[in-house]
Image (spheres, rainbow, N blue to C red):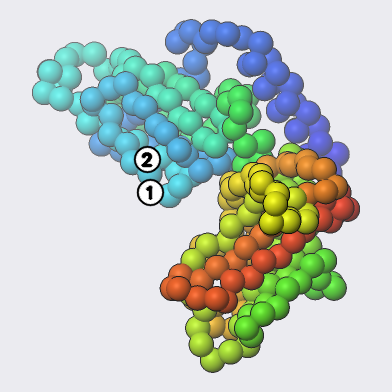
Amino acid sequence: MKSFLLSMLACFATLSLFAQQPETFRSQLPQILLEKEVSLHILSPEPISYVDISSSQVMGDLPQENVLRLKWKPDSLAEESSDSEGSLGVLTVVGESFMAQYELSFSDRAGSSFIPASYSISPEEIKPLVGKASIPTSELRKHVLAMLSSRKHRPLRKIKAHGVAMQLNAVYTVGDLVLLDITATNSTNLSYDIDQMRMKIEDRKITKATNVQAMEVEPIWQLYGHGALKRSFRNIYVLKKMTFPANKVLHIQLSEKQLSGRTLDLKVKYKDILDADTF
C-alpha cells in the first residue's frame, strides 16, 4: 500500500511539472524505435480516443481499446536509401484524461535485440487534459463492479406501478463523480422495452400555475446499455458532481419505447446524495 501511494504521489508530481510547461520540443520527446515489417504494440493505461501518426510510412490501428499497433512499411525511396536508421516524425496518443507524444525512429537492422516488441505508456510521459474525466474508465469500472458485488441493502428510494418497479439501491461518490445504483423489475408477462432513463433536476412540488424549470442531467457513463426488461435489470449510472437546493429533487424517469402508460418516476432527494458512500 505504501509503495502504491508513493507511486501515485510521484505521478501527480510529474503531472504538475508537465502542467507548468507550456511547450514541449521534439528533442524532449521519448524515443520509440520501429523495425522493418515488425509490429510494435503500445499499451495505454486508458482507452485510446485519438491517434496521430506524422508519417505515411507508419501504419497504425487499435486492435483493443487500450492497445495501439504500429508497423513501419518503408516506401521505395526509403528502400534505396543507405541510411540504416532515421526519423519517422511524431506519434501522438490521446486517452480519456491524458496526451502522450513520442519521436518515432526506424532501423533496418533486422533481428536487433534492442528494438522493443511492446511499449507501455508510463505516468512520466503523459500530459493531463484539462476538463476531461478525472478518473479513467478502467478505474471507474473497478468501482462499479465492486458496487454490483456488494451485499444489497434496503433501497433508498423506490416506486412501483403497472407491475413494473424501480429502486435506487445505493449512491456512491468517487472523486468528482456520483454513481447511482438502480434496479428495475418487471413482474408481468409483458416484456418492457426500455426507451431511456431520463434524469433532471426540478422542483419537488409542482403546481399547475408554476412555470416548471427543469435542468437535464446526462449520465457521462453507464455500465450497460438499455434493452428489454423481462424480469430484472440492474445498472450503474455515473453523473458529474451536482448541487441543488432542498426544494428540488433529482427526477429519474424510466420510459417504454412504444406508446405506453408504464412510465416510472423516481424522485431522489439531495440528502440521498449528501449521505452517499465513498470509495
Residue annotated with mark 2: 69
Q: Residues within 10 Å of mark 1 (few under 14, many from 20)?
A: few
- Establish if 249 lies above or below 133: below
Closer to us: 128 or 26: 128
Q: Is the Cβ of the residue at disc 1 closer than 8 Å to that at disc 2?
A: yes
Q: Amino acid at mark 1?
A: Pro
Write the residue at 80% across / 32% down. Answer: 6
Picture quadrant where residue 36 is located:
top left
Quadrant of the image for the N terminus? Answer: top right
Q: Amino acid at mark 2?
A: Arg
Distance from disc 1 to disc 2, alpha carbons, whole Å, reads: 7 Å
> Is 181 displayed left or right of 97 in the figure?
right
- Of the residues under marks 1 and 2, which one precedes in the sequence? 1
Write the residue at 85% across / 39% down. Answer: 2
Residue annotated with mark 1: 63
Write the residue at 73% across / 56% down. Answer: 207
Residue 20, horizontal then vertical, whole percent = 66, 11
